[in-house]
Amino acid sequence: MNTFNFNRRDLLAAGTASAAGLCLPQAQAQSAWPNKPLRLVVPFATGGSSEIVARAVVGELAKTMGQSVFVDNKPGAAGNIAMQEVAGSTDEHTLILGHIGTLAVNPYIFPKLPYDANRDFAPITLVAKVPSLYVVHPDLPVKNLKEFVAYAKARPGQMNYGSAGNGSAGHLAFEYLKMATETFVLHVPYRGTGPMLTDLMAGRLQAASVGAPALLQFIKAGKLRCIATGTSQRLPQLPDVPTVAEQGFKGFEMTQWYGLLAPAKWAKPNIAKLELESMKAARSALVKEKLANETALAVGNTGAEFEAFIKVEQARWKQVIARAQIKPEGMG
């Protein structure tokens, strides 16, 4: 009897050890994620604030994740092409840099999207907030926003401004300014900030609103003139440029923002790990310094905080879009 009990205990112990052995590779596989380079998709052309923010954070994220992280620009359809691709990806190594346009604007200007901004993505962290600047070609005879408004009102419909595309942050920022100043300026959409800035500096456009990181070098070189900042306070990098609010439009504020998102169907442990390491990267001294040099503010909040922030922004821009009657390209 005792012998039988002893043998049964041995068998149970052996079975438990065997089961633990079978589970070990799976546990190791989970803990080893990521097991190949991560791809950060940027849904716009090179040369804009989105790429600058992405490249500022990928190096530090690579350190914390233990795998290289590379930026992949996928412009087109106001960011919808890239958002659709990442939402449908299954390799659990592809994430996206979301921003004001793809998350808080597109859901309200497109009658049907190939993705659901809230359902298909897991917010990871808000990486940065970027001040919007209002600039003109240096040949335009205006030195500040007040002069620009007077110049535009004297020429209704004769002035133009460019943006990275319909529904882009630059489009919203300038329409917001038009509403505040009661001016009529024509919109010329481009496929990305880079091509638009090329035409602006060549004099084929007269004005634009773009995130500060993409503009500072051109402002300092005299290739563009900044007539106002969208921030609540003047920027240290542009101390002589007054805010929109300072120039007679009280309460006006406009900033762009960028954050990391992963497909919602990722394994929860992988989402949690990416959130933790992304927060570390965004809050690191190196990333803060890089972004500060580009006039951007590093954030690095939790996924839940980023999700709440997106919802607030969606409510805000839904109203602006309705008032400005912003439509996607090709739709009247």
Image: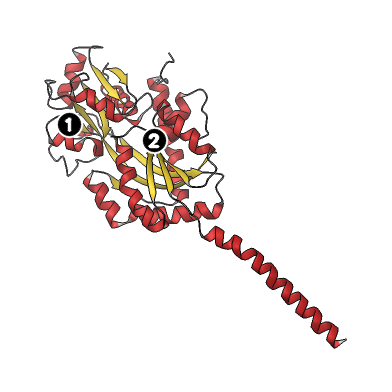
Residue wearing tag 1? 226
The quarter of the picture where the N terminus appears is: bottom right
- Alpha carbons under labels 2 and 1: distance apart: 22 Å
Amino acid type, label 1: Cys
Q: Quadrant of residue 135?
A: top left
Q: Nearer the viewer, residue 151 or 167?
A: 167
At label 2, which amino acid type do we have? Ile
Residue at the farthest bottom position: 2
Quarter-of-image position of residue 215? top left
Which residue corresponds to the image point at 28% horizontal and 57% vertical from the top-left?
A: 285
Residue named by callout 2? 100
Q: Are marks 2 and 1 in contact (CB under 8 Å)?
A: no
- Viewer can see residue 46: yes
Q: Position of residue 74 (x, y in %)?
A: 40, 33
Q: Residue 138, how many percent across, how many down?
A: 13, 25
Q: Position of residue 287 (x, y in %)?
A: 29, 52
Q: Quadrant of the C terminus?
A: top left
SS for callout 2: helix
Residue 254 lies left or right of residue 100; in this view the side is left
Looking at the rendered structure, the number of numbered marks drawn on it comes to 2
For this rendering, which residue is in front, 52 or 113? 52
Q: Which mark is residue 260?
A: none
The residue positioned 44% from the left and 56% from the top of the image is 276
Instruction: Please tell me how crowded label 1 is: few (under 14), some (14-19), or many (20+) other residues with Cα within 10 Å.
Output: many
